Image (spheres, rainbow, N blue to C red):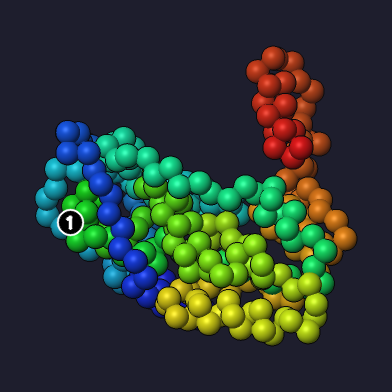
Amino acid sequence: MFAWSPSEIDPLIICLRLHVNLASRPVAQNRCNFAPKRVAIIEAEIDKLLDTDLIEEVSYSEWLANVVLVVKKDQCKWGVCVDYTNLNKACPKDNFLLPRIDQLVDSTFGNKLLSFMDTYSGYNQIMLHEEDKANTFFIIKRGTYCYKVMPFALKNARAMYQRLINRIFKEHISKTMEVYVDDMTVKVPRRADQIKNLAEAFSLLKKYHMKLNPSKCTFAVSSSKFLGYLVTQRRIEDYPNQIKVIFNMNSLARMKEIQILTGRATAFN
């Protein structure tokens, strides 16, 4: 049920179709050049994906995208993503609605205990349809590859994953569980229900071969961070790190800066 590395992911839950518009002309991007240090980072990540059978090497495709490097949340590591801008434009938008964050956070109020869980590379636990692999081709200095599972950068990935999660936990959502994409919480209004509620969630995770990231799971606590908020038994607060940026801002001198601040403040209203 827990995955300590990508090699322990078992992507056998469901299969994704991209539904690429047949009238859209495929776009083959020219390969971008990177500095040697960044090439090493990219190739190390590609080796990891190859070793875990999440991608495979290919020879030719009409669709071809570049990789991009992004700074991860901890600001200490580079993440490797694929720029699927052109492919996303050719795919219809999946209008499946995500849950409202404020309602999910409010629903945690008043529980004796809460358990927070995060799936391990959740999107990669969904298989990609065989015919759509050619649409995910990407290029680096040493070769061309395609995904065998759903990559993170696809436009409809979040909607697809939320739909899957809703189906799996449909009997428990809004009762003993709340789920937002790959973030899950198990609610326990009475301490005596802790084992039962967790067992029900674990049973479904095991049934559908879904893996959790142990480093991002917290069990049986009275308070923790959830979807950007600090939730406790008695109250819900803005998470300190979320609002620290606002308190540390310099004095505003332009209208654009005021508009940005107003937008951030509205998010916490």
Of helix, strand and loop, which one carries label 1? helix
Q: Quarter of the image holding residue 184?
A: bottom right
Kindly identify the residue that appears in the image at 34 percent across and 66 percent down. 14
- Furthest residue to the right? 234
Q: Is residue 207 left or right of residue 118?
A: left
- Relative to the observer, which residue lies in front, 111 or 118? 111
106 or 155: which is nearer to us? 106
Where does residue 85 sit, x and y in percent of width and height? Answer: 34, 37
Q: Amino acid at mark 1?
A: Glu
Is residue 240 placed above or below 205 in the rendered structure? above
Q: Nearer the viewer, residue 32 or 53?
A: 53
The quarter of the picture where the C terminus appears is top right
Tell me the crowding category of disc 1: few under 14, some 14 to 19, or many 20 or more residues within 10 angstroms, Cα based: few
Vertical placement of residue 11 versus 75, above or below: below
Could you say where residue 51 lies in the image, as x and y percent from the top left?
31, 72
User: Outermost residue toward the left?
Assistant: 60
Q: Residue 204's spot in the image, x, y percent?
A: 50, 77
Name the residue at 78% across, 48% down. 238
Using the rendered view, name the quadrant where residue 44 is placed: bottom left
Total labels drawn: 1
Q: Considering only vertical position in the picture, is 21 above or below 47? A: above
Residue 223 picture quarter:
bottom right
Q: Residue at x 70, y 14 (%)?
A: 254
Residue marked by disc 1: 131
Q: Position of residue 77 (x, y in %)?
A: 52, 55
Residue 140 appears in the rendering:
no
Tell me if residue 12 can be seen.
Answer: yes
Say which residue appears at 17% left-offset and 33% top-offset. 23
- Front residue (pair 242, 87): 87
